[in-house]
Image: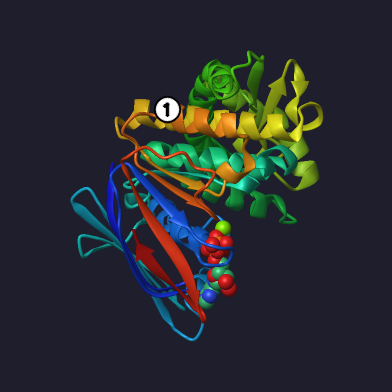
Amino acid sequence: MIAKSLDLYNFRNYHKIHLDLHPKKNIIIGNNGTGKTNILESIVMIADTRSFRADDDQDLILKTEDTARIDLKVDDDLYRMIITNSGKTLFINNTTIKRSSDFIGKVNAVLFKPDDLEIFTRGPRYRRRILDLEIGKMSKKYLEALLTYSRLLKDKNALLKEDVINDIYLKALEERMILPIKILIEEREELIKYIDQNISRYYESLTDQKEDIRIIYKRSCEADEEKIKDMIDNDHRRDLFYHYTVSGPHKEDITFMFHGSDVTNYASQGQKRLVMLSFKLAIVEYIIKKTNEKPILLLDDILSELDIENKERLLKILPKDIQTIITATDIQNIKLDSEYRLFRLEKRRNTSDQREE
Ligand SMILES: Nc1ncnc2c1ncn2[C@@H]1O[C@H](COP(=O)(O)OP(=O)(O)O)[C@@H](O)[C@H]1O
Ligand SMILES: [Mg+2]
């Protein structure tokens, strides 16, 4: 998929900005604080319907204004999000889209950002969120299973906290959980297996070094209805004791291994960065395989962190004809071929202007 143009109104530090995007490479140059990440964030809002850094959507609206708008034209369709203090509204070609699951995944973008390394340091919840986000964009079935499971889990945990527990209701909730659990485990397993089989190859193309890298799925159960039922039954007493559902997809995790040791404690910072990039590149390849569409790649400030060699290799191994938007503080560290468009952001009081070269 190709994003043709982006228009922002009162989004973050932009009062109004229009970018005509190049189908291949777009480079956004600007000093710190000029709004480079804000541009990528607006595209992620359209892709995922939520931000990777704002906890509150209100932060996305230009201070002193009350409504922000993002218009992203992708192929022949116009995707629009309007953010006000009472929430956000989604549109495709001027038609309101009520359910976010009908919007998520229509535009697929993969963001590479410096703090992606948090995947190694933060807790399991963070890693599950990444899995859910990536798979959810490719599979509506997964997204719906996730919504159903979360709702049932919430009801079950609330029930487990009551003084007198209605066993029939509890059993009914558990029964309805089986199918969504199966879907979640199945699809997580498929993605993780694919990454596991390909991550070392990407690492090698980035570094020219052969390393044994694995990603391990710590699943709660096999993706089999009988086994899931057994897991639920076996945990029944512990659930009652802890007043909480002790196992299931909401407890799963992934671990990255580098020559048999946990990457978190074993690999250097530079190696972690390359493992992370290899992980993302494997996801991009998986998305292309599953959806038959090339996602838009957003590279936020990551080139500045790589050695010249890794940088050049990264730009070289990106899938062919994939649209990329790269941000950087200066252009010196980017080797350019002929097909690109350059945008320079300049700070003017509280908003930024953009100059196209
Ligand atoms: N809601 C908002 N209203 C006005 N300015 C904002 C808002 N949110 C963020 N900003 C400004 O955006 C700038 C940061 O933009 P960012 O895209 O992170 O910059 P960078 O170019 O370093 O990536 C900061 O100057 C910040 O004050
Ligand atoms: Mg930034």
Q: Nearer the viewer, residue 242 or 302?
A: 302
Q: Is residue 244 depicted above or below 67 in this figure?
A: above
- Residue 215: give x, y in percent of width and height: 63, 23
Give the residue at the far front of this rendering: 332
Q: Is residue 223 depicted above or below 116 in this figure?
A: above
Question: Which quarter of the rendering shows the N terminus?
Answer: top left
Residue 56 can be seen in this image: no
Model colouring: rainbow
Q: Nearer the viewer, residue 312 or 172?
A: 312
Q: Residue at x 51, y 27 (%)?
A: 313
- Residue 149: give x, y in percent of width and height: 52, 43
Could you tell me which secondary element the residue under label 1 belongs to? Answer: helix
Give the quarter the ligand 2 occupies.
Answer: bottom right
Left or right of 94 in this view: 348: right
Left or right of 95 in this view: 142: right
Quarter location, residue 228: top right
Residue 68 can be seen in this image: yes
Left or right of 137 in this view: 253: right
Give the total number of marks visible in the rendering.
Answer: 1
Mark 1 residue CB less than 8 A from any atom of ligand 2 = no
Give the labeled residue for mark 1. 285
Q: Residue at x 37, y 37 (%)?
A: 337
Neighbourhood count class around disc 1 (C-alpha, 10 Å): few under 14, some 14–19, many 20 upward:
some
Q: Residue at x 74, y 27 (%)?
A: 263
Going by the numbered disc 1, the residue's amino acid type is Glu
Question: Which quarter of the rendering shows the C terminus?
Answer: bottom left
- Residue 23: give x, y in percent of width and height: 28, 44
- Residue 218: give x, y in percent of width and height: 67, 26
Q: Residue at x 63, y 13 (%)?
A: 210
